[in-house]
Amino acid sequence: MPNLSNRTALIKPSPTLTLDAKVKAMKAQGIGIINLSVGEPDFQTPDHIKEAAIKAIRDGFTRYTPSEGIPELREAISRKLSLDNSLSYNPSQIVVSNGGKHALYNIMQCLFQEGDEVIIPTPYWVTYPDLVLLSGATPVFVPTYRQDGYILRPDVLARVLTPRSRGLILNSPSNPTGVVYSRENLKALAETVAAADLWVISDDIYEKLVYDQTPFVNLVMAAPELQSRVVIAHGVSKTYCMTGWRIGFLAGPEPLARAAAKLQSQMTSNPNSVAQKAALAALEGPQECIDSLREAFGRRRNILVELLRKIPGVTCPEPKGAFYVFPDFSRHFGRTIGRVKIEKADDLASVLLEECQVATVPGSGFGEKRSIRLSYAASDDELRQGLERLTNLLI
Ligand SMILES: Cc1ncc(COP(=O)(O)O)c(C=O)c1O
């Protein structure tokens, strides 16, 4: 066989999707797995959204659409940004893609290239480094600290800047820590970002999943003077339980939007026509479905945090958004559980899966080896059972 390109050798398969496939295979074999590894809401897409898609099919809305997405959906996104975030974006500054991940891929392909450095605060969502690598640029990791609530500090950011620094990725609410940046946190970063002439990618995908009345703010809202250097990546996957529909979007300066639409026109032609109609119904229809989602996740978060904090040697910061907790298990490192010496979170997550049939995601994929990500996109019952097994394993 002739050689494959170097490009695919640069990246690794998504660790979360790989684990998900393993868990599904174990389930198919009849193994009673409790799955706390999932990155998607366990609720159904609301009926009015499904109906809009069914209508689109019946109406024959099944052909190619404009590459950048149908005008009415881009107008709806523009309205959403205005109403929810008080931000002004013309539809010409918005491109609809095949999921938030695809929007991020397009953004990075359009902004970065060989020789560039893109700064990623750790812990980070597993996909960012690989998307940076695919653009030709080099990921540069900048630490955030538990004692700062995992918020990136401007002085720490300043330490990793070089003449090659070209971009910074911010994700709030964050996957995996659940941290939510405040207006002040973002304002504090604005000066450093502008002085270093960075692009900032603001991944807002968990915007609506915030608890305890925590307000959602992104960098453009906090520092409007930065609008021309910020690109928002977003989508309907998490907010409307639409992970399988694959609709995401970007909002940013018009030249970037034009470049992303051009790239997309040669890559996927357009996002799925029927899913675009569904996303339109999601954004324009009743929004109460989000309140019930937020209410359910808020309750489950409380259950999980309370149970985790009862386990000796586990430190569990309280997440303010998204649907993950990211507790630190490092005080259990050095112990032998079963036949396995626990040296890092990966070892613990494997024992948990093999011996207790509880699936979680070890922190190494997120750039933090002391923690494990547990998702609370699972029923109250599963959360309690999963935590009982974890507690019995550790005490
Ligand atoms: C932080 C973050 N950004 C983006 C995405 C991508 O979402 P989508 O399913 O729309 O591609 C995810 C999905 O897990 C995520 O966690």
Image: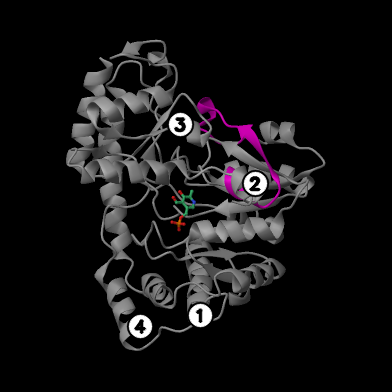
Q: Can residue 118 be seen in the rendering of this structure? A: yes
Whichever of callouts 3 and 4 sits on the residue coming sooner in the sequence is 4
Residue 262 at x, y percent in the picture? 66, 72
Residue closer to the observer: 264 or 201: 264
Q: Amino acid at mark 2?
A: Leu
Label 3 vs label 2, nearer the camera: 2
Residue for badge 1: 70
Whichever of callouts 3 and 1 sits on the residue coming sooner in the sequence is 1
Is residue 139 a member of the stretch shown in magenta? yes
What mark, if any, has residue 52 been given in the picture? none
Q: Amino acid at mark 4?
A: Ala
Q: Residue drawn 28% across and 51% down?
A: 295
Q: Is residue 256 above or below residue 14?
A: below
Cα distance between the residues tagged 3 and 1: 39 Å
- Report whether 262 appears left or right of 392: right
Residue for badge 4: 56
What mark, if any, has residue 133 been given in the picture? 2
Residue 138 at x, y percent in the picture? 70, 42
Residue for badge 3: 363
Label 2 vs label 4, nearer the camera: 2
Cα distance between the residues tagged 2 and 4: 38 Å
